[in-house]
Amino acid sequence: MRVSVAARGEDGVRAFQAEQLDCILMDVRMPDISGFEACKRIRSLPGGRSVPIVFLTALRDVETFDLALAAGADDFLTKPVRPTELLIRVQTALKLRRLGSEVGSLYEGIRQQRDDLMRLQLQKDRLTAFLVHDFKNPVNSMELRAQLLLRHRDLPSDVRAGVLQIRSDVRHLMRLILNVLDVSKGEEAALRPTPVRLELGGLVTRVFETLEMTANDAGVTLESQVREFTVTADPDLLERVLENLIENAVRHAPRDSLVSVEATHGDQRVEIRIRDRGRGVPAEIAERLFDAFIQAEPDSEASRGSRTGRGLGLAFCKVAVHAHGGEIWVENADPGAAFCVRLPHD
């Protein structure tokens, strides 16, 4: 296999004129003419209508996608792209082109369905970005006002308890919003931690303070067995990982039981374990527990302690831990479940 490289759109058009290429990968933004214009010119040349052209761009919006299709693109990939995915998409483009020469109407139908799915995905991504941005401001405003109310020393005890509950719920909502954003970044390999040295025991204490009301309402005791030592991690991401995992443990723990956090450090690694005393994790769900949008059982006293995954919290944990170069998994603890996080440690 031989690869021809062109740094500019005009050079790409000339390269196609000079030799018959089997497939073309093309960016949208180039120094002279755009990828759209280069694609149109290649399509107008002899043999240009039969060569697969795949756009590879950092632009992730429906408008760019539609312009690429209008220019004559066969496929559309957004950066960053995993090498395996790129190889598969190029192979698919070549196969579809060969299929197109044999059964044209079927080929066009397959292309149309694929393009419709891609457009829906881009629209979903844009909607997610809009919602996250628009939700963050009012949620931050609610927490600020709750904090201001709590400064008044003459608040009746029942009012203070209500404000504390509002603050707890607002923080939970903000965590959900950030989870949506970070899971989306993780899918694009765009989540970039900013690691610093952290004292793990203090971080666990802060998380316990945040979740104190949640644990009290559930009748669950939080216990830290974390000895004083440091880890290297992004403070915000690791704190939210612990919040999600501990809250998940509280939600699935029986009343009057314990949720514990312990940590050990060994050769170039730190391992954190969050354990509850619930029913554990069914074998059929364990492998998919950290996938997004796993369907959960409804909350009820009868179903309390059962576990089938929920929302985006565990999916965020997986994305954030992997972004640190770490690992996350779940074990049955007999009784209950233990969620384990392993992070690199220098």
Image (cartoon, grey):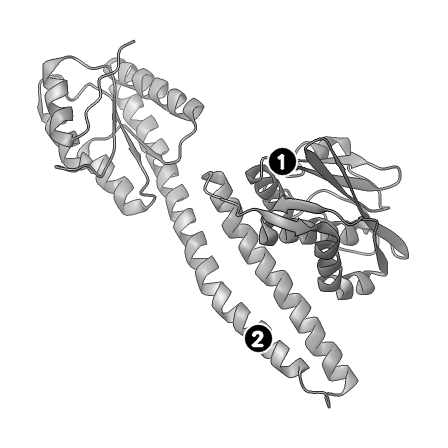
- Specify which label sits upstream in the sequence, 1 or 2: 2
Q: List the residue tagged with mark 1.
A: 326
Classify 87 as above or below 305: above
CA separation in Å, label 1 and label 2:
34 Å
Looking at the figure, which quarter contains the C terminus? Answer: top right
In the displayed structure image, the side of residue 181 where residue 342 appears, left or right:
right
Mark 1, secondary structure of its residue? loop
Q: Amino acid at mark 2?
A: Leu
In the displayed structure image, the side of residue 154 where residue 131 appears, left or right:
left
Q: Residue at x 47, y 38 (%)?
A: 189
Q: Residue at x 32, y 46 (%)?
A: 61
| Horizontal and vertical percent position of residue 202 | 73, 57
When asked about the image quadrant of residue 334, the answer is top right
| Horizontal and vertical percent position of residue 265 | 75, 37
Q: Residue furthest right?
A: 256
- Front disc: 1 or 2: 1
| Horizontal and vertical percent position of residue 333 | 85, 37
Q: List the residue tagged with mark 2.
A: 144
Mark 2, secondary structure of its residue? helix
Can residue 130 be seen from the camera position used here? yes
Q: Amino acid at mark 1?
A: Gly
When asked about the image quadrant of residue 78, the answer is top left
**Crowding near the residue tagged with mark 2, few <14, some 14–19, many ≥20 C-alpha atoms within 10 Å:** few
Classify 181 as above or below 162: above
